[in-house]
Structure formats: structure tokens, C-alpha cells
Image (spheres, grey):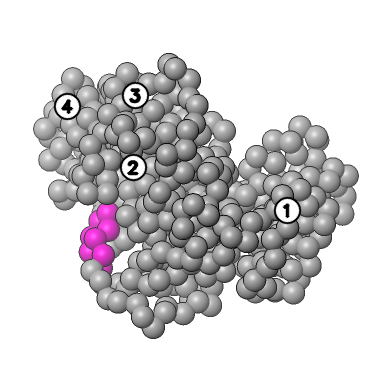
Amino acid sequence: MNVVMVLLLYAVLEAGADDNLQRGMQAYNQGRYKDAIQILQQSAVGERQADSKATALYYTGLSQQRLNNLKEAEASYRSAYELRPSAEVGKYSLQALQNLAGKGKATPNRVNAATASAGNDDLKNLPNQIKIPFVRGSSRHLFVDGYINGKATRLMFDTGAEECFASAELLQELNLTVPANSRPIRIQGSVGTVTGLVAPMTVQVGPISRLVPVLVAPGGVEPLLGQSWFRGFDYQIDNPGGFIRFTKKGTSQSLPSDVLKVPFKKMGNNLLVNIQVNGRELPMIFDTGANTVTMSQAHAAYLGISIPADAPRGYSSGIGGSTETALVYVDRMQLGPITKAHVPVWVSAGDKMPLLGQEFFRDRPFTIDYDENVIKFLP
């Protein structure tokens, strides 16, 4: 399903909306845009609930835009906005219209032109707090809807990525050209190093649009929303609720008094936490961009973890290529006061730092506090 409408989906389901809306969302998420349009148009015609009808129209517009049917997309977005102008679906439809037009005038209680203008990185003009819905991809990564230079795409939220990333193939699909003032760079990915470019591009998520350096390299890796975009903000990931809350640094926010605090150290742009694995301590990178818990064969050997001959095999893909992995299960893993048993861990060759991915913490909301250098988990 499309990430913009996750929160609305619950209301849709409770209102008894037909299956076409859900099927259309699924078709869009799978890249079957023609099928999505047909199903969603049927849903929009038969739907009585205004939110559900507007949701179907918005999804229709997204699918039409991905097929480069821009006039049809504009009509769908406009219909969704006119139907529910003050709801979340209306606000996102207005954003989509403004991106199609390349400009737009803000209206009260809608998208603020100062925060939506391309390249506006002045934090004082950005909202103190925004809440962005996400969905999980097939690999359980977190994805949000966004725009690169005005073209709609989904972005993987990756706290382990210093910069935003877009593959050369994606830019070609979106009919985007790399700016002439880009510079070559060697990009160190999770499984290797490739030659790419650093390109200044406008990345927008929700009402915030920022001109940031985007790493561009060949390969079929999903586009990444990295630290350069949300720099200046703290963020809270509510896994059960399905949204990310960005709060401007220095802005007060209330959390329960019984939060579970886990300290971390900065290692470059990564967050390093200490994990107890079967009674042994191992530093790991806390990485929302990683789906699973991964480590090298050397780290597994240090922890006394053996790899059975019949262990399931797979591949870990990232910038730079892919590497073969083997699945093992760890009896006990502990992060501060949080303990889990029988944790799946993927082991690969090489000397990369171990990653603590979503498999371990996806069922808990948490906030990264860079002032105190702690991760705050809600109990």
C-alpha cells in the first residue's frame, strides 16, 4: 500500500470499505500501475465514504503519474483534494498538484509554501514537528512517499546512510538528468564500493523539501532517505503505529517517564550500541535501514556461533553488489533492558560491522536523542 495513506487505511477498514481499495493499494505498491488504476477507479465510483473515495482518487493519481499520464494524474489529485481538502489525503493531493505544476500558492491550514519550497534548508522556517506514515516493503524495510526533483517515488528511510541515494536507473525511469555540477565519488556501500556521482537535488517528504547531496550510482538498490535530509531533526519511529515523527532539535516533546534508555556512541554517522549475545558483548550498528540482524563470520566465531551445514542460504544486497549469507538462530540477545530469544541472524563473509536491524526492534516505538546520546524505547 502507499505510505501516505497508512493512517487513513484503518478508518477505511473500520468503515467497511470494499476490497477494491485494498487491492488497488497493493497493486500500486507492487508496481502494477495499470491494474491499480482500473481497480481504484472502480473503488472510487462505488465508495460512499469521503476519505475512502479520496484515497482511491489519490492512489489513482499516483499510478497515473508513474505511467507519465500527467494530465490524468492532475485530474485525479484535484478531485481527491476537492473532496477532502483539510484531511491528510487532501494535503498530500495538494502537494502532488504543486509538484506537477512546479510551483504553488499556499493556503491557510494547507501546505506552507515556505516549508515546501525547493532547497529551503533554513530550519527556522521548517515545522517544529511532522508525522510521516510509512509502510514496510517485502523485505520489512521502512518506506515513505516522497519526491526527487518533483518526481514521485518511494524512499527507504535509512538512519545508517549519511546521504540520500538514488540509482542511475531510477533517475532514468523518472526522466531526471544528473545536474551538470555533480562531482564523481567512490561510494562505500554495505557490500562493496562503486564509482558514482554526488548530485545536488531537491528531496521532499511530507511538507519538507530540502536541497541535499544525492549519491547516484548504477544498480537496482532502492532510493534512500539518509541523514542529510533529516539533519536538524530528532525522530521517533512508531513501529506499531506505522509512522515516523520528526521533531526539530531543541523543541520540547513529552515522553513517558518510564522510557527505556539505551546509550549509543557515534562512529562517524553511525550509532554504535553494545549487544549482549549469549552472554558476550558485541558492538553493533543500530540501523533502521537494515531489515535483519547481520554479522560477519569472524564475529559469529567470536560469539561461539557455528553455522550448520544445512543452514538456509540467501543474499544480502546493497550499494556495490551482493554477498551470500547463511541463517542461524541466536538463543539470547539483549540491548539494554530489552531481551529477545531465538533471534534470526544472517552471517556473511567479509569484515563489515554487525548491524542490528528491524528484526530486533520493529515492535517498539523509539526516539533517537542525539543530545543525550541515547535511544529511548517506549515500554
Q: Which residue is mark 1?
A: 108
| Circle 4: residue type | Glu
| Circle 1: residue type | Pro
Residue 189 on the magenta span = yes
Q: Which residue is mark 2?
A: 287
Horizontal and vertical percent position of residue 130 = 56, 44
Q: Left or right? Give the position of 185 relative to 88.
A: left
Horizontal and vertical percent position of residue 100 = 66, 71
Residue 75 on the magenta span = no
Residue 282 sits in which quadrant? top left
Q: Which residue is mark 4?
A: 281
Residues at marks 2 and 4 touching, judged by CB atoms closer than 8 Å = no
User: Label 2's element?
Assistant: loop
Q: Which residue is mark 3?
A: 261
Nearest to viewer (mark 4 / mark 3): 3
For the question of whether residue 62 can be seen, the reply is no
Horizontal and vertical percent position of residue 350 = 16, 50
User: Label 1's element?
Assistant: loop
Spatial CA span between label 3 and label 1: 39 Å
Residue 36 sits in which quadrant? bottom right
- Residue visible at 73% across and 53% down in the picture: 108
